Image (spheres, rainbow, N blue to C red):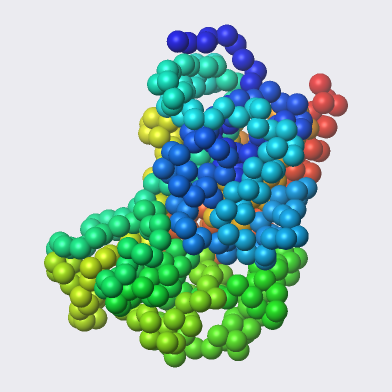
Amino acid sequence: MINAETSSRTCIIGAGSSGIAAAKTFTERGIPFDCFEFSDRVGGNWVYQNKNGMSACYRGLSINTSKVRMAYSDFPMPDSYPDFPNHRQIAAYFDAYIDHFGVRKNITFETSVKRVERRPDGSFDVTVKHVPTGREETKHYARVVVANGHHWKPRLPDPAFPGHFDGLAMHAHAYDEPSIFEGKNVVVLGMGNSAMDIAVEASYTAKSVTLCSRRGAWIVPKYLLGRPLDTLFTSPRVPFRIRRKVAETILEQTIGDLRKYGLPEPDHRFGSAHPTISSRILDRFSHGAITYKPNIESLKGDRIRFVDGSEQEADVLVYCTGYHVTFPFFDTSFVTAENNDLPLFRRVVHPEIANLFFIGLLQPLGAVMPLAEAQSKWVADLLEGRYALPDSSAIQADIAQERSEMFERYVPSARHTMQVDFDEYLMALEQERKRGEKRAKATRRSA
């Protein structure tokens, strides 16, 4: 069934933490929209065992950014929450957020977006499928906001390691609880937050736990100097090189040399890769509950061989190797993120499709939620005519500069194709909003 009526409405794809920020902003501003969510509730990745099966949330998950820095600007988390709430509290917070601002009525649940196709006039046909009935319909929209998340399609090593593995091989996305590791020899590949969490949880029930990786990482506890770590070193007005030096000095004095724990030194400066945040991993290393090995060389049935020539008996292999950035509703000839890379103006506006926006498609040194909120307000300004984009050449120059600075600062990796500094990004986006307001006013005066 096709609804071909001309529409000035906006389609928001997804009601995770980014999609609900856009839906709340549009509701407040009176911008007509439809928001489609595949699952039966909001919260996306933070909903444990969500109905669409796409969440990476596991039973013991808690946030690794503080509640103060994760909350939306006009809706603080409850005082009763700890500094680092668990997933149940975060999911409840998202529910309270949409109910407080009257957004729930504007979200269509259990509805997947199957196709988004651009019309000759630049508008979009969006085909959705209502999951309970299987019925499909196509609606017409003036613009599309993509907020489908980027932590739901697992990425495995490519090329795969040679050989075969006889035990249970799984991606971190499939992990639920540590009982599956009881009495087993477990190998965890990766040095990110998921790898650290899973290795720690496994170490209490497994026969042995080995953590392996391509490179070392800066390991940062959740508290430094008696404060949540993400409330330190945050001022964007202090040059990054100074903030980095202060952070390195404090970590060297509090954590010390990681080689004492059997871990490799990072091969990069602090802040040149997404930090690994854990207050528990070093304790488990210091007690011998986890050992470290370099990267995997090959799989040998019931054993794993590492690049240093050593081998480890293994019953379970957990790949904590990240996710593919993908948009299954777009034809790849239209929009794709090859190698997880999609150049955008300020990580939001497609440079060639001015009515296609992406909310939350970035990897901050901090939480996504406040950034998605700021992005949503910016897009709303544009739709209301309060903000005007710069010309095409200026957009391309801005994207090129952002990418140059990003690739210069961060370790080359599919993990660092959309990396931003939390506070620097917010400040730069606010400055761009002000410049765009001046452009919009100048345009109205000359009209």
Left or right position of 91 against 61? right
Residue 116 spot, x, y in % from top left: 46, 25
- Quarter occupied by the N terminus: top left
Q: How many marks?
A: 0
Query: What residue do we see at 14% from left, 66% from top?
Result: 301
Tell me residue 373's x, y (percent). Answer: 68, 45
Left-right relation of 179 to 47: left
Residue drawn at the location 51% of the way across and 39% of the way down: 148
Camera-side residue of 362 and 316: 316
Q: Residue at x 20, y 78 (%)?
A: 311
Q: Does any portion of residue 144 appear in the rendered image?
A: no
Q: Picture coordinates of residue 325 (x, y %)?
A: 43, 46
Q: Quadrant of residue 379?
A: top right
Residue 199 placement (x, y as % from top left):
40, 71
Residue extending farthest to the right is 445
Q: Nearer the viewer, residue 188 or 436?
A: 188
Left or right, 441 with reference to 175 = right
Q: Nearer the viewer, residue 280 or 220?
A: 280
Please tell me whether residue 422 is drawn above or below residue 361 in the rendered image: below
Q: Is residue 4 above or below residue 299?
A: above
- Identify the residue shown where x is 52% and y is 10%: 3
Residue 57 appears anywhere in the view: yes
**Where is 389 relative to 223, above or below?**
above
Figure quadrant of residue 307: bottom left
For the C terminus, the quadrant is top right
Q: Is residue 82 above or below residue 355?
A: below
Quadrant of the image occupied by residue 354: top right
